[in-house]
Image (cartoon, helix red, strand yellow):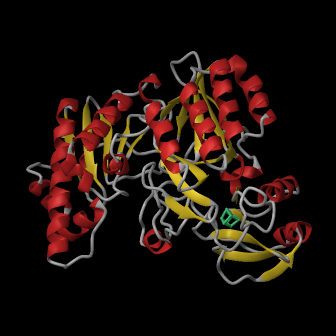
Amino acid sequence: MTGPSIESAARGWCPSLLTPMESGDGLLVRVKPRAATLTAGQAEAVAQAARRYGNGMIEPTNRGHLQVRGLTDGTVDGFAAAMAGIGLAAAKPEAEAVRNVLADPLGPDDPAARFDSHALAHRLSAVLESDPAFHALPDKFGLLVDAGVALPLAGCTADIAIRADGNRRTVEPAGGDRVLRLPEDAVEDAVRRLLTAFLAWRKGAQDAAAISAPRRMKSMVAACGAHAVFEAAGLNGVRLAESGPPRAAEPPPAGFAPVRDAAWGYFAIAAPFGSMEADGLVALAGLSRRYADGTIRVTPWKSFVLWGVSPADAADLRTAAADIGLVAEPNDPRRRIVACAGRPRCASGHADTRADAAFLAAAGLPGTGVLHLSGCAKGCAHPAPAAVALVATPGGYNLVRNGRAGDAPGRTYLTREAAAEALAAPNPVVPIPAVCETPVRQLAGTVAE
Ligand code: SF4
């Protein structure tokens, strides 16, 4: 199986498990956990397959997926078969590409949740997978199901979002000022109608060449108005202001959080520098078996959550997670650093970016915003602008402020010690938002979705 060209990636093509993307360190695929959840056994199998078929690097994404890197034309089918064997793939590539349903991490385990978001996410995934008409949806098109009160999907949007409103559900197309308010058993039909209306409008727009291949619901809402979108679907939306509590804005920090009305809480853990070796995922699975409920919840904040942690075990879990190199403290500077595979994992790398990232984190990290360490100018790990990008060259690191790895540097040929000094020097940086739906330019090898 051959990956797409760099040109198609730059136009916003989105990889999935069965449609890999070419990147600087090989082919890249995405594994989509169902209802935000991996069992510990599934996580171990993903790690084992990432090692066997790829270069072992795994990155949680801002869509709650796991990105596995370093595959080849000769190994990508084996990896996909391994994922299908553990229930993490649809049977057909076209179904897998559109199986984009984001769910809040805790689902029915949240004592205050008004409905079972994970059950609904499973049902909506089945709708997307089983109806061939919906396989024509753009691969970026996604649904969101959020019943979270202890851990809502802060900062996240989607093409169609389903949330709780008392004992009813709201169904909200992106970009509008109207929602549907429905009993839960009417949600699937409403989503089907909205998807059908979107696809009909998209085809019409393409046929008329009035708009080039619109890919998102917000484009339809912007072109037609929310009222007309509902009308096209045979539905009757109400003004958004009439419905719904305020939404959480901030994702949870790393560490333990008690949950009201529960005897236990959740523990948020992030991968250092935005990615982890396969061994890290295996170790995380072990921590879940020992301290939590034996599952790993994959979040849209590029992190993981373990559920069912006793407050009495929180300190031990924090120590155990830190011992295996994971981020378990709220202010860990490694959360602000993104580093690609680098040398020796990637043949294009001019430096061991992850070792140098650890050096810079230990040296302290003044300022705010994302620090991106890239092994070369391709910038695989962070295609969006970063507050600072350090880009390895054969002569040392080039430093780019408020830009991408491929942009013109302000400083050149720095050792990592000199880079640390440059970071410590007063220089205002622009914070880069780190929530889902951050607009990024899609390039080959992106981690952003
Ligand atoms: S950016 Fe990093 S992972 Fe990508 S090709 Fe360059 S060295 Fe390899």
| 6 vs 232, nearest the viewer | 6
Residue 139 appears in which quarter of the rendering? Answer: bottom left
For this view, does 205 lie left or right of residue 437?
left
Looking at the picture, does residue 222 appear above or below residue 449?
below
Is residue 249 in sight in this rendering? no
For this view, does 234 lie left or right of residue 273?
left
Identify the residue at image location x=53%, y=18%: 262
| 5 vs 390, nearest the viewer | 5
In percent of width and height, residue 128 lies at 27, 44
Identify the residue at image location x=43%, y=29%: 107
Looking at the image, the residue that sits furthest to the front is: 74
Looking at the image, the residue that sits furthest to the right is: 417
Looking at the picture, does residue 87 appear above or below residue 211?
above
Looking at the picture, does residue 264 appear above or below residue 443?
above
In percent of width and height, residue 380 lies at 62, 64
For this view, does 292 lie left or right of residue 416?
left
In percent of width and height, residue 410 lies at 76, 83
Residue 118 appears in which quarter of the rendering? Answer: top left
